[in-house]
Amino acid sequence: MPRRTPACLVLSLAILLYGCQQVLPPATIAPATSTAFQQQISLPSPTETPIQAPTEISPTSAPLTPSPTSTPTVTPLPAGLYLDPANWQAWPVIPIVPEFARLIYERGLSLGNDPHAFSVFGDCQSEPKVFMGVYETDTALVAALPRDLMETVAWFNGSFNRKSSTVRGGTTTGAVLWPAWHRNRYNCTTYETPLQCELRTHTPSFVILHVGTHYESRNEGYMRTILDQLIEAGVVPILASKADNRESDEHVNAQYAQLAVEYSLPFWNFWAAVENLPNRGLYTRPDAAYQGDLYLTDEAAAIQRLTALQMLDVVRRAVAGP
């Protein structure tokens, strides 16, 4: 990956490229605060009684080839996500799926979204070869999965190993909303954002929001805009925590946990999945020492793939049924 290199691009935008190529989008993108669909739905109060978290695999002890008894148990959908955002580090790895996610999903079906498609918004550690592409390229690995997870791999076939406008080194929340980021590739048009392009070309029912390593000062505002646009399009957003702490105070993960509670959305707590690994499964690349601990070890990457698949299995069964 390239070293730190300043560049001046269109719209008088200063972009800083480092590691996975961080980008700051135009300041004219204003975060939305609500959507017409959300205004029709009365979200539950977060002060109601907390619910039982779903049973899950302990990802730090899960082998790369899991046993047939390791499938998480799906619980009935609660009205809301009754968890304390301040205690997000103790949240379950596999998400609780609130009823609002099912309402979004059903709206998406009425709009023509593909129930067998999901998309990823993320940086270089979300690229198919690093993330979940193996579920379409490694038949032996898939054959060793529990039957429920094999069904989910078959259900989403075509989404695991595809390249898209929303996965690229350095992708941030703002980059997903910046038309120049897709570089007119992936059949994207000049004036649509990567988010809009991905929804048009892939019509997913679910989006894994795997961004945050390259955070921005306006990160929360941009994420709100992303959530509002996805919900309005009938796409179920799945927020995710990250393993690294580049911001030094974990505020990015805390922000995403707060948004998950506020919007009543699933939250895949990948941070908790690797918290017991040495250095949380992170290391510094010798050729990019200035980046610090950013990249996942092989063990952490395997946990990331497996828990992401478990998460997809739980979310899709919760909103669509067995």
Image: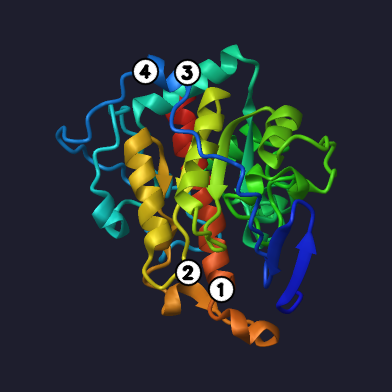
Amino acid type of the residue that numbered disc 3 sits on in the rendered structure: Ala
Q: Which residue is mark 3?
A: 36
Residue 124 in view in this figure: yes
Kindly report which numbered mark, 4 or 2, lies closer to the viewer in this rendering.
4
| Image depth: mark 1 or mark 4 in front | 4
Residue 322 visible (yes or no): no
Residue 153: where, in percent of width, then height?
A: 62, 40
State the CA–CA distance, disc 1 to disc 4: 39 Å
Q: Residues within 10 Å of mark 2 (few under 14, many from 20)?
A: many
> Residue 155: image x %, image y %?
62, 32
Task: Select label 3 or label 2 by which is in front.
Answer: 3
Mark nearer the N terminus (1 vs 2):
2
Badges 4 and 2: C-beta atoms under 8 Å apart?
Answer: no
Taking the view exactly as shown, the residue that stands out farthest to the top is 110
Vertical comparison of 23 with 295: above or below: above
**What residue type is disc 1 on?**
Leu
